[in-house]
Image (cartoon, helix red, strand yellow):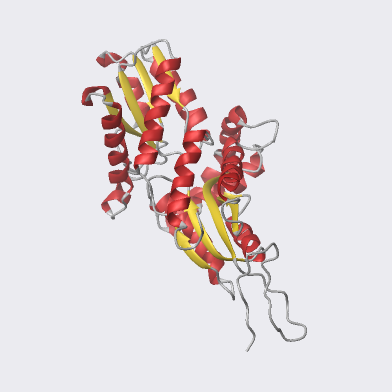
């Protein structure tokens, strides 16, 4: 019988007798794959159209029956939206790297994570992928397998679990595994919406921002990406986890309930989504005497279109137009030391039993 071992050396290749002509088999490494939502390859019409088509064709994201949704998507949305959305992306585009900020930040998160843990266990290989767009999840899983990773930890970079984010990211990974003859063992990191390391990191970013601005906010607004209300009624845990994150953050900061609120942004279509809507709230607060606000987006692990353009752009403008006086946004944890502490904490915990950390 052919024997293969897990050597702790640089090659991590199969050892022992193998039949003549047998392909090289690499084993013994442990993959960590950070998974994020995705970003278009460019901001032109056709790049945006490809990205939007992949995103909005996902049945986890849009649950409308295909017979209804297909003509709406292909005849209306993919004709009308690529141009305006491309201009929105262009306003936040990383011109130096010619890529969206989500890609820039996610790459850095993976590189920094690798620097933190690979020297503690040389078997660990860290990589990153996008659910939509590039680098694709299938490509990176195949690459990890080629490196000899027979164990892979999937880490969806969403603190709160949702079918339209963490679940679909895992779906894409599982679709790849279904086609593999030699599957690696797989773990999926759970959400960390109530992890003390995450909550403390959020609180520190708020305190840091408060020390940088020259006003005292009347209200701290936690904004999460919205989903249709129907998803909550079907059993999605997202809404409850968002509210728990907000409560723990408020309690950690010691803020009064009447100076803290939770909203949901990025509504799409005509269905009822989780409320209150951020854009409506921005228009209503000044009339209630709330003229100075601070906004944080705890559901995003990296700044992206929804934070840089939508919150700091559209929602800020809406607030100021309706009588607001001061508006400030707390950046996402991103690849900051606090942000990396959160990701490393999750990864190190979930690698227990596999890696020597």
In this rendering, the answer to whether 344 lies above or below 297 is below
| Relative side of 23 to 187, left or right | right
Please name whichever residue, 159 or 327, is drawn nearer the observer in this view of the structure: 159
**Which residue is at the far right?**
21
Query: Where is residue 275, by image quadrant?
Result: top left
Q: Residue 49 appears at what percent x and percent y?
A: 60, 45
Q: Residue 185 appears at what percent x and percent y?
A: 51, 68
Q: Is residue 308 visible?
A: yes
| Relative side of 198 to 94, left or right | left
Query: Where is residue 197, by image quadrant?
Result: top left
Please name whichever residue, 277 or 334, is drawn nearer the observer in this view of the structure: 334
**Which residue is at the far bottom?**
1
Q: Residue 342 appears at what percent x and percent y?
A: 45, 42
Q: Is residue 58 visible?
A: no
Please name whichever residue, 356 or 182, is drawn nearer the observer in this view of the structure: 356
In this rendering, the answer to whether 62 lies above or below 87 is below
């Amino acid at each position: 019988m052919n024997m293969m071992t897990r050597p702790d050396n640089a090659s991590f290749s199969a050892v022992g007798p193998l039949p003549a002509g047998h392909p090289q088999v690499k084993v013994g490494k442990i993959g960590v794959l950070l998974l994020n939502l995705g970003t278009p390859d460019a901001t032109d019409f056709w790049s945006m159209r490809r990205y939007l088509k992949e995103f909005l064709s996902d049945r986890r994201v849009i649950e409308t029956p295909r017979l209804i949704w297909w003509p709406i998507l292909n005849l209306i949305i993919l004709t009308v939206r690529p141009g305006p959305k491309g201009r929105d992306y262009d306003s936040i585009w990383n011109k130096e790297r010619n890529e969206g900020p989500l890609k820039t930040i996610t790459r850095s998160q993976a590189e920094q994570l690798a620097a933190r843990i690979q020297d503690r266990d040389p078997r660990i290989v860290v990589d990153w992928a996008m659910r939509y767009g590039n680098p694709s999840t299938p490509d990176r899983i195949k690459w990890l397998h080629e490196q000899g990773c027979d164990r892979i930890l999937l880490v969806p970079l969403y603190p709160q679990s949702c079918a339209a984010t963490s679940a679909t990211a895992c779906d894409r990974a599982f679709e790849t595994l279904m086609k593999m003859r030699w599957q690696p063992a797989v773990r999926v990191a759970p959400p960390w919406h109530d992890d003390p390391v995450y909550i403390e990191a959020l609180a520190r970013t708020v305190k840091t921002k408060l020390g940088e601005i020259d006003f005292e906010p009347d209200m701290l607004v936690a904004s999460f990406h919205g989903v249709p209300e129907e998803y909550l009624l079907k059993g999605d845990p997202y809404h409850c986890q968002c509210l728990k994150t907000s409560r723990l953050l408020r309690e950690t900061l010691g803020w009064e309930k009447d100076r803290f609120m939770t909203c949901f942004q990025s509504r799409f279509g005509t269905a009822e989504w989780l409320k209150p809507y951020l854009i409506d709230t921005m228009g209503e607060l000044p009339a209630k005497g709330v003229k100075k606000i601070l906004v944080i987006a705890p559901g995003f692990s990296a700044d992206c279109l929804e934070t840089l353009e939508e919150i700091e752009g559209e929602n800020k403008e809406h607030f100021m137009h309706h009588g607001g006086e001061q508006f400030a946004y707390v950046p996402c944890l991103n690849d900051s030391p606090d942000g990396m502490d959160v990701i490393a904490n999750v990864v190190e915990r979930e690698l227990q039993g596999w890696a020597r950390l």
